[in-house]
Image (cartoon, rainbow, N blue to C red):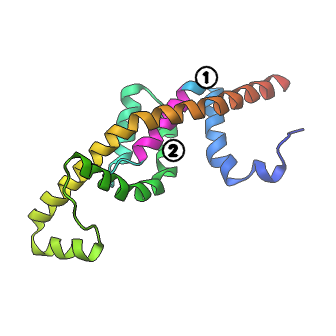
Amino acid sequence: MSAVPAAAEGSWWRRRIVAPILAQLRQGITPERIALTAALGAVIAVFPILGSTTLLCGLAAWALRLNQPVIQLVNYLCYPLQFALLLPLYRAGEWFGAPHVSLSIPEMLARFEAGPLEFVAEFGLVALGGVAAWLVVAPFAILLLYLALRPPLRLLAARSRLRGTAR
């Protein structure tokens, strides 16, 4: 008999998150590889250029031979964090020389209408500053997430092996 209640087995979390990770573990992917994939996916998900994370995650997974479905799953789950961290990353980018500009929507629209090329040039520098801030923080965030995810994934793999041998 399963230790997990029947209602939890069919939960969204179990079906959409745990089950795909368990499937990867059963196919022989190590907990360490899944932890690295998830850590990279989460950190790339907050890259401060909207619309770029799916491609960046795909390229990272391809280059490092990581699991595409897992990295994209984590990317999509962390998507709301991109919005939450966009302004802090842009403001941190000012430490790297990006200009301080108002990021209010009405003011941005007025600036765009006044001169689209100037708008792109000015806000492009803001975005580059955000990328610089992200580049400084990203390696540490990847390391911390990797170290935090490895133990629970090892535990999940061990439990999965125990269930597999008990059948």
Q: Secondary structure at mark 2?
A: helix
**Mark 1: amino acid:** Gly
Who comes first in sequence, dot 1 or dot 2?
1
Q: Identify the image quadrant of the C terminus.
A: top right
Q: Residue 163: image x %, image y %? A: 80, 29
Q: For residue 74: magenta?
A: no
Q: Which residue is mark 1?
A: 28
Crowding near the residue tagged with mark 1, few <14, some 14–19, many ≥20 C-alpha atoms within 10 Å: few
Numbered mark located on residue 67 in the image: none
Give the CA distance from mark 1 to mark 2: 20 Å
Nearer-the-camera pick, 28 or 147: 147
- Would residue 167 be found to the left or right of residue 47 on screen? right
Spot occupied by residue 39 in the image (x, y as percentages of width and height): 49, 36
| Amino acid identity at mark 2 | Val
Kindly report the secondary structure that dominates the magenta region of the rendered protein: helix
| Residue 106: x %, y % from top left | 26, 77
Q: Locate residue 73, reporting x and y percent.
A: 51, 45
| Region rendered in magenta | 33-45
Picture quarter containing residue 115? bottom left
Above or below, comparing residue 51 to residue 70 in the picture: below
Q: Which mark is residue 74?
A: 2
Outermost residue, front side: 95
Q: Residue at x 66, y 50 (%)?
A: 13
User: In percent of the image, x 25 and y 68: which residue is there?
Assistant: 102
